Amino acid sequence: MRKDRYESPLASRYASEYMLHLFSPDMRFSTWRRLWVALARAEHTLGLPVSAEQVEELAAHTEDIDYDVVAAREKEIRHDVMAHIYAYGQVCPKAAGIIHLGATSCYVTDNADLILYREGLRYLRRQLLAAMSNLCDFAERYRAMPTLGYTHYQPAQPVTVGKRATLWLQDLESDLAELDFVIGSMKFLGCRGTTGTEASFLDLFEGDTDRIDEMNRLIAEEFGFAQCFPVCGQTYPRKTDSRILNVLSSIAQSCYRFANDLRLLQHDRQVEEPFEDKQVGSSAMAYKRNPMRCERICSLSRYLMADAMNAPMTASVQWMERTLDDSANRRISLPEGFLCADAILRLVQNVTNGLHVNEKIVDRTVREYLPFIATENLLMEAVKRGGDRQQLHEIIRRCSMEATGRMKEGERCDLLERLAAESAFAMTGEEMRELLDPALYTGRCAQQVERYVASVRPLLSEKAEHGQEITL
């Protein structure tokens, strides 16, 4: 491989072989040829002067693309589709005269894009389900393990490790629903002519509009599409691209949130991403264990969220029936959006498959703040013993501030001792400590996890083999 030319890190470092092949020249241009075969087959079926022999010849040569012939022809005529038609005709001499009959360039370029994008979305769906499956397992395993909850990234009421994982899982489930909508609503362009009027086919079919509709139905059906767009210009509506990149951006947003939470938790050594035996955390500080996978997820997610802005800007400036200022942008933004989403989900699978919970640190962290968290329960118990609620509240406030000040000086928390020394509480330190079981303060977390994961499990039945075990 040459190393004196720029190469995209998405291709050389991050994306899967599947996604790289899906957006390769071979896949793109062989799909063009398959579309020309489908057009010829439909035209033959519907009585146009296209023979079965010509269709068979075209079908036999969808893969043997001579890129040197294409490049030489394109350099001469400055038109990529016509260059490919020429190269196709060279290996299909009997069918050369009927290739692309009645079509315009967008017949192959746009329909091929729709085919590839749909396949890309389906693949990402499988990747997303694999990540969700990992999180389901993790959430169930730790459904009842108390951990310190945070609001404003300040210590708050305890939750469980599993309950927190369901927040990440729920974001991904939302993305799955959006992804399914986009896949389910995708339509085919068909063969509609230079401005979407099908005028060329009115001539070819001598005004028989039913045969035009049947031709488009046959072509769409061959590629697994149930519908064509009811109306169009020369291209399919570019809002479709917005839908596609928007759902990829949505996945990136969820993955960023998950990875950022992990980075914060790893800072406190509560939960950590995978770390191999010989992995190096820093070139200078050998002791470091950086959350490099989660940092990469966040980095790539920011890129994808920004990339998604290309599609609405392109969709908003399409002039009348067609303008070509979309082409160069789409060649970059759509494939790279898919490659980036693929890279992100592969990383998320890897991280969720190897999350490590440092249980003793999690327990120590929650217990450090538990005396403060338990004060409401202590107040209720003291009231039951005849105390004045307002007076007790003020005592808790004062003692809490004093204990916090002590902790800021590096001393241990002595809140319970301070409260026990207050006669208004009428409780001993030992009686107070009996109320310091973390499990008493996690509410319905375990039950919420069980119910939610049970509702998500049926969605995972379509999980495919791709990307289940990933080494990065």
Image (spheres, grey):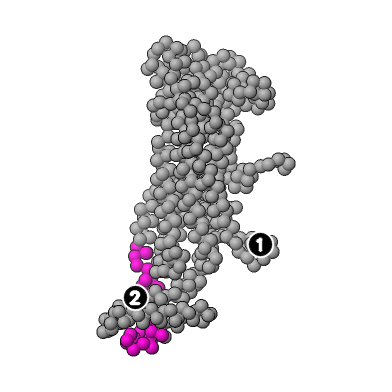
Relative image position of residue 349 (x, y in whole percent): 51, 52
- Please state, as top left, top right, bottom left or bottom right, where the N terminus lies in the image: top right
Q: Secondary structure at mark 1?
A: loop
Relative image position of residue 204 (x, y in whole percent): 46, 12
Looking at the picture, which amino acid does disc 1 mark? Ser
Compare residues 244 and 394 and report the one nearer the observer: 394
Q: CA distance from mark 2 to mark 1?
A: 45 Å
Tell me the residue that label 2 is attached to.
376
Compare residues 399 and 16 and report the one nearer the observer: 399
* Residue 422 magenta: yes
Q: Which residue occupies 69% across, 64% down? A: 284
In the figure, residue 398 lies in which quadrant? bottom left
Q: Which residues are magenta?
A: 418-447
439 versus 25 height, above or below: below
Q: Which residue occupies 69% across, 61% down? A: 283
Tell me the residue that label 1 is attached to.
282
Q: Are marks 2 and 1 in contact (CB under 8 Å)?
A: no
